[in-house]
Image (cartoon, helix red, strand yellow):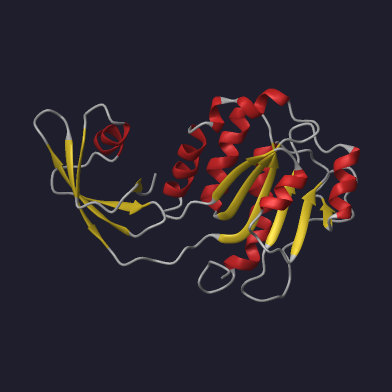
Amino acid sequence: MNLLLIEQPEREQTWLPSDVRTIHLKDVLRCSTGELVDFGVINGPRGKGQVNWLTDGSVRLKFQWYDQHPSCLLPISLWVGLSRPQTCRKVLEQAAALGVSELIFFQADKSEPSYASSSLWQQEWRKWLIKGTEQAFACHLPSCLKVTGLEEAKAVSSVCYRVRFALDVYEADGVLASPQGGGNNDSVQLAIGPERGWSTQERQWLRQNKFLLKHMGKRVLRVETAVVAAVAKIAGVYWSRTDGSGR
């Protein structure tokens, strides 16, 4: 991780020797007393934490916070069909690292029903968002929801889209490309099916709701690979702007 995120902008914290963050400071970063480490507050400012090792192996951190900085999340709403928990963990981490602003997991026709009741969707999912955001040296987490299907995903999405894409190897009418033109507030909704793909009914729904079915070549990709490739393709138009946020 390239910075460590904490929940609140506190002046000081002490972490026990068994805390995974303490272990990271000791064994990975190999911090010495007095060393400054990059920190951030979730959806808040960045800053520095000064390390002070205690005799019992705990670490005391004193923080200095900078001014609040604007969100660098991209105006991309990513919809992903529920897949195996290990796949969804990868999607959560990589989507957060890439900076999508909204992540919606939906129960697809070909999703295994038991996936929705995985322990991942209790509290663990947020941990993976944090890991991805830390890796990106960022503080702002995407919103994340789990819904019952495409219709509910449409109802709860907070992104006012300019264009909608859905990945489909079999019935796409062209290759996925970055949206062209438009203003800084243009947003994209991107739908990616579960591991077994779309049903006939879902393809019909997507077309009726103005999703453009696109492919990324003839190769069938894993869900997590398709997420990274497709988001990166779409994000290019925002990355080319000077502030990197597309807003």
Q: Residue at x 17, y 33 (%)?
A: 58
Residue placed furthest toward the top: 114
115, above or below 183, in the image = above
Q: Which residue is drawn at 34% across and 53% down?
A: 40
Quarter where residue 185 is shown:
bottom right
Q: Which residue is drawn at 72% across and 25% down?
A: 113
114, above or below 8, in the image = above
Q: Where is residue 53 in the image (x, y as percent from the top left)?
A: 13, 38
- Position of the N terminus by quadrant: top left
- Position of the C terminus by quadrant: bottom right
Q: Position of residue 239 (x, y in %)?
A: 58, 66
Quarter where residue 146 is shown:
top right
Q: Position of residue 133 (x, y in %)?
A: 46, 49
Q: Is residue 216 visible?
A: no
Front residue of 173 and 100: 100
Residue placed furthest toward the left: 55
Q: In this view, does 73 lie to the left or right of 7?
A: right
236, above or below 134, in the image = below
Quarter where residue 197 is shown:
top right
218, above or below 40, in the image = above
Q: In this view, does 187 lie to the left or right of 199?
A: left
Q: Is residue 109 visible?
A: yes
Q: In this view, does 33 lie to the left or right of 128?
A: left
Q: Residue at x 11, y 35 (%)?
A: 54
